[in-house]
Image (spheres, helix red, strand yellow):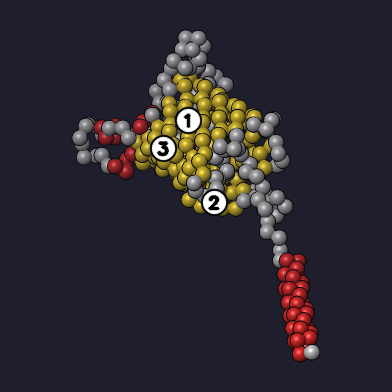
């Protein structure tokens, strides 16, 4: 009889324990559900407006995720002169090799070196806001900065080699840009930007500063293929000019827009662009300050870019 009593008592305690446990679990689930209902869903960003962080020689608003390394190869052949120079391939070319690394999901730093003028560059790209799928934020905004250092012999800046006029700061140029982009749908993306270019040292007949506007677009016509276009337009603003144009016809006027049009083929880790462009410089400050070729008047060259991503 005692054994039966013990068994019944043990069974009652087990049932009571299970009831308490189930009641507690049910209450926790209800609380969790209530919390979930009350929480505001997190805004999801749209896919990047452009397949690559690079478009011709321009930076796009696309920023790779943190711990991503990007290798960049940019090449410009010479200006085309028909079959005489095999459409520019035998002419004077320019090339840049660079590396970009994403420190954060919205911050990338980069370094590179360019053939013409032996330019070394340091770049920074910071995404300020990002377009969302709900369009509560309709655009992506990025700040882009390029510091260039001219690596030519210091006599380039001296009237006489070895004169006291040389300073290291003479070599430095900068390009500061604010870019706004929007991905309209799976096919069309556009961006516009305003920029300020500065050179610490130029010949006496040229300006140190220039303001410019740039526009770029991409139309994706297949899963991997896109038509890409861009234009950089220097502005003639008297308030920041050092040199006023006069009747001196020997002075070369560097104020032509840089027009580019091409095709991009991309995958999740690669992007290849082949295009026609009018400026031979590769760093943006070179294109804005020193282009004197007209895209529509024998001022075209062939170029290509190749980028490769690695995640760590």
| Picture residue at 52% right of the left edge, 22% below the top | 302
Instruction: Give the secondary structure at mark 2.
Output: loop
| Picture residue at 36% right of the left edge, 31% below the top | 117
Q: Earlier in the sequence, mark 2 or mark 3?
A: 2
Q: CA distance from mark 2 to mark 1?
A: 24 Å
Q: Which circle, 2 or 3, is nearer the viewer? A: 2
Q: Nearer the viewer, residue 108 or 308?
A: 308
Residue extending farthest to the bottom is 2
| Residue 133 makes an appearance in the image | yes
| Quarter holding residue 43 | bottom right
Which label number is shown at residue 26?
A: none
Q: Which circle, 2 or 1, is nearer the viewer? A: 2
Which label number is shown at residue 74?
A: 1
Dot 2 crowding, Cα within 10 Å, few <14, some 14–19, many 20+: some
Question: Percent x, y for residue 171?
Answer: 33, 39
Question: Percent x, y for residue 5?
Answer: 78, 88
| Picture residue at 27% right of the left edge, 35% below the top | 154
Q: Which residue is mark 3?
A: 112
Q: Earlier in the sequence, mark 3 or mark 1?
A: 1
Q: Is residue 303 above or below residue 219?
A: above
User: In the displayed structure, does residue 218 sit left or right of residue 156?
Assistant: right
Q: Earlier in the sequence, mark 2 or mark 1?
A: 1
Question: Percent x, y for residue 212?
Answer: 52, 39
Q: Nearer the viewer, residue 69 or 168?
A: 69
Q: Which residue is mark 2?
A: 105
Q: CA distance from mark 3 to mark 1?
A: 10 Å
Q: Is residue 218 above or below residue 301?
A: below
| Picture residue at 59% right of the left edge, 49% below the top | 141
| Residue 199 makes an appearance in the image | no
Question: Percent x, y for residue 82?
Answer: 51, 11
Q: Are marks 2 and 1 in contact (CB under 8 Å)?
A: no
């Amino acid at each position: 009889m005692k054994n039966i009593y013990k068994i019944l008592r043990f069974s009652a305690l087990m049932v009571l324990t299970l009831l308490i446990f189930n009641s507690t679990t049910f209450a926790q689930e209800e609380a969790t559900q209530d919390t979930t209902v009350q929480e505001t869903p997190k805004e999801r960003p749209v896919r990047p407006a452009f397949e690559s962080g690079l478009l011709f020689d321009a930076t796009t608003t696309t920023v790779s995720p943190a711990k991503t390394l990007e290798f960049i190869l940019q090449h410009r052949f010479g200006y085309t002169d028909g079959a005489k120079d095999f459409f520019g391939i035998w002419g004077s070319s320019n090339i840049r090799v660079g590396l970009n690394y994403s420190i954060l999901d919205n911050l990338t730093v980069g370094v590179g070196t360019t053939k013409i003028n032996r330019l070394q560059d340091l770049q920074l790209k910071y995404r300020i806001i990002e377009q969302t799928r709900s369009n509560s934020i309709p655009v992506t905004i990025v700040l882009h900065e390029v510091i260039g250092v001219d690596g030519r012999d210091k006599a380039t800046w001296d009237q006489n080699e070895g004169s006291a006029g040389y300073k290291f700061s003479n070599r430095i140029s900068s390009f500061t840009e604010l870019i706004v982009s929007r991905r309209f749908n799976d096919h069309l993306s556009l961006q516009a930007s305003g920029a300020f270019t500065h050179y610490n040292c130029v010949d006496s007949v040229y300006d140190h500063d220039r303001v410019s506007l740039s526009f770029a677009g991409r139309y994706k016509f297949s899963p991997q293929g896109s038509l890409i276009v861009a234009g950089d337009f220097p502005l003639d603003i008297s308030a920041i000019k050092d040199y006023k144009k006069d009747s001196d016809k020997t002075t070369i006027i560097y104020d032509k827009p840089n027009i580019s049009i091409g095709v991009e083929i991309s995958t999740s880790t690669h992007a290849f662009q082949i295009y026609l462009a009018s400026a031979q410089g590769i760093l943006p400050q070179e294109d804005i300050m020193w282009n004197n070729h007209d895209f529509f008047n024998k001022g075209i060259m062939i170029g290509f870019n190749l980028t490769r991503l690695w995640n760590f």
